[in-house]
Amino acid sequence: MNEHVRTGRAPAPNPIADDGDEQHFCSTCAFGSVCLPAGVEKGALAELHMLVEHVGPYRTDEAIFRSGERFGAIFAVRAGMVKTRTIDAAGREQVLGFHLPGEMVGLNAIHPAKYPCDALALDTVFVCRFSFPALATLAARMPGVQQQLFRLLSADIGKATQRAGDYTADERLAAFLLDLADRYAARGFSANALRLAMSRNDIANYLRLAAETVSRVLRRFQDQGLIAVDGREVVLRDRARLAHLARNILAQ
């Protein structure tokens, strides 16, 4: 039996998605699946003045960008996890999402031309910075990149719609864990073992629940044999039952 399954301990994800070179994007990049098969190489991007900068490290709670700053770039997470959030006039925080290696941050700034939220590092974070004017020029010339941008924007909207329904705490947390595990698996990590870099308060805020409710449901899931929890490390032990709990959300 694998050690992390036996002990309930999830191995730390590979800290950096860095298998690219001077010719190709990293395989986990949000554009990797489009650019590699289509033969769109970094050399071609350079000819189009497409600047891709490796930026970081950002330490815990450091900002990649702040709400209200002028929009000029979108970011692909290379390592670590990024939280996006807004702060209202009364000082209340609203968590918008958590972004893993290979995922894009800043897409919701395209229309207002300024960042409508903060993007904060939850641990040690490295990002790739994509100049958006250059990316827009590239998208106009290369339909595959344009289609991927549309897919990423659509996925962003879909996630917000999913959370808006009148769902129970069990449904919300089961769907959250499955979604996070599936996103890690899509990037080559374990499909059943994950590390929650975000706090319980952040999870609760994101799911529109009380922090005490999140802790209580996690304990109940563990007692029922659905998951194993060790601090921030979680192993999904019964995906089928979790999927059944989350079926109304996952069907959206």
Image: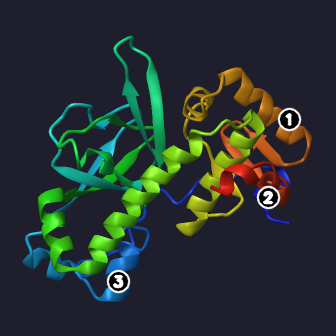
Q: Nearer the viewer, residue 194 or 249?
A: 249
Dot 1 amino acid type? Arg
Q: Which residue is mark 3?
A: 36
x then y, percent, for residue 248: 72, 51
Q: Earlier in the sequence, mark 2 or mark 1?
A: 1
Dot 3 amino acid type? Leu
Q: Which residue is mark 2?
A: 239
**Dot 3: within a 10 Å radius of its alpha carbon, few (fewer than 14), some, or many (20 or more) residues?**
some
Evaluate whether residue 9 shows in this view.
no
195, above or below 76, in the image: above
Q: Nearer the viewer, residue 244 or 124?
A: 244
- Tell me the residue at 61%/42% (across/down): 196
What secondary structure is found at the residue carrying circle 3?
helix
- Tell me the residue at 40%/65% (across/down): 151
x then y, percent, for residue 165: 62, 39
Q: Earlier in the sequence, mark 3 or mark 1?
A: 3
- Seen as rendered, the residue at the extreme right is 224
**Dot 2: within a 10 Å radius of its alpha carbon, few (fewer than 14), some, or many (20 or more) residues?**
some
Q: Split into 4 quadrants, where in the image is the N terminus?
A: bottom right
Dot 2 amino acid type? Arg
Q: Earlier in the sequence, mark 2 or mark 3?
A: 3
- Tell me the residue at 66%/22% (across/down): 210
Q: Which residue is mark 1?
A: 220
